[in-house]
Amino acid sequence: MSRSKTPKEPPAEPHDQDDWELLRDLDRRNAFQLLVGGTPHSHVDLDDPTYLEYEYVRQIAHLVDLAAEERAPLRVLHLGGGGLTLPRYIAVTRPGSGQQVVEIEGKLLDFVRTELPLPRNARVRLRTGDARDVLSRVPEGAFDLTVSDVFAAARIPRHLTSVEYYGLAKRALRPTGVHAVNLADGDSGGLMFTRRQVANAKQHFAHVVLIADPGILRGRKFGNLILLASDVPLPVDGLIRRAASDPFPSRVVRGQDLVDFQGGAKPVPDDEAHPSPAPPADAF
């Protein structure tokens, strides 16, 4: 597969350090919530990196738990850094994993590394750069898992929502690898953004599933949806069991149900791509 050229994208507005805020979690002794520009971004428990406060992070972690034998190391590329919650989880549950984190806000990475240090012996390389640019240059077939979790002003930038972007993710994966995407959509527009992301994934991968709160899937509220894509069958039965047992149960959409959800939506090329929908004012 040839590498696609990254379309021109206006650079994200840089955040001043005043825009980064750590709020102590009063229910946990050494846990914090990271806010960026006033928007909740990450939750980190320094004493217990396996504690995952956010539903969407737990949903990705379910895939991590089922991706290989227990404690077997993985090669993971994280596109979007934030508080490094998932890299911490993987470092502890799958010791020896080699991980790279790409974050456009280099000063934010420095802030997090200082204020929320990574677990001892975590093999996590932090890189400053644009997610798509770095993805286009990583070695082919280098990773077991790519995780796309990039937001600017609470929206996914448009150059990370096209079918070409999914093609770059596939190129970076081993034949058995999985691409995971944190999407945001909701109570207006009929979830068309997410339907098109499903179409993008199906253009490149043989197996695709969607995990989300049933209320989001029905368009009743705005929130996160997790898309998983691979060329090998995904651990659907395990995902269903874990999603159902979460504190806030979620639904795994697959097979004909996913076809019905997609509803004829087509893949989105670079020149037609748009950012994810803006969240409503009361979303957070």
Image: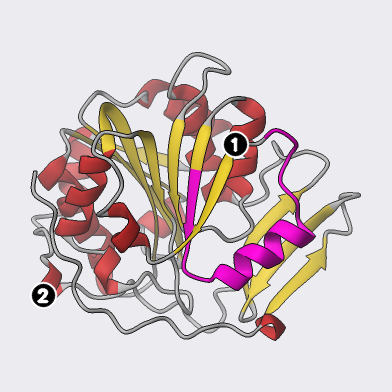
Disc 1 marks a residue whose amino acid type is Arg
Q: Position of residue 168 (x, y in %)?
A: 21, 50
Residue 1 vs residue 156, the one in the foreground? 1
Does 27 lie within the magenta span? Answer: no
The tag on residue 123 is 1
Residue most toward the top?
A: 69
Q: Position of residue 244 (x, y in %)?
A: 52, 33
Dot 1: element:
loop
Q: Residues within 10 Å of mark 1 (few under 14, many from 20)?
A: some
Which residue is found at the position 83% from the left and 41% from the top? Answer: 47
- At a point 35% along the width and 75% down the height, the residue shown is 277
Residue 15 sits above or below residue 173 on the image: below
The dot on residue 238 is none
Q: State the CA–CA distance, disc 2 to disc 1.
A: 37 Å
Nearer the observer: mark 2 or 1; the answer is 1
First of labels 2, 1 by sequence position: 1
Residue 107 lies in the magenta-colored region: yes
Tell me how the rendering is colored.
Answer: secondary structure
Q: Which residues are magenta?
A: 100-121
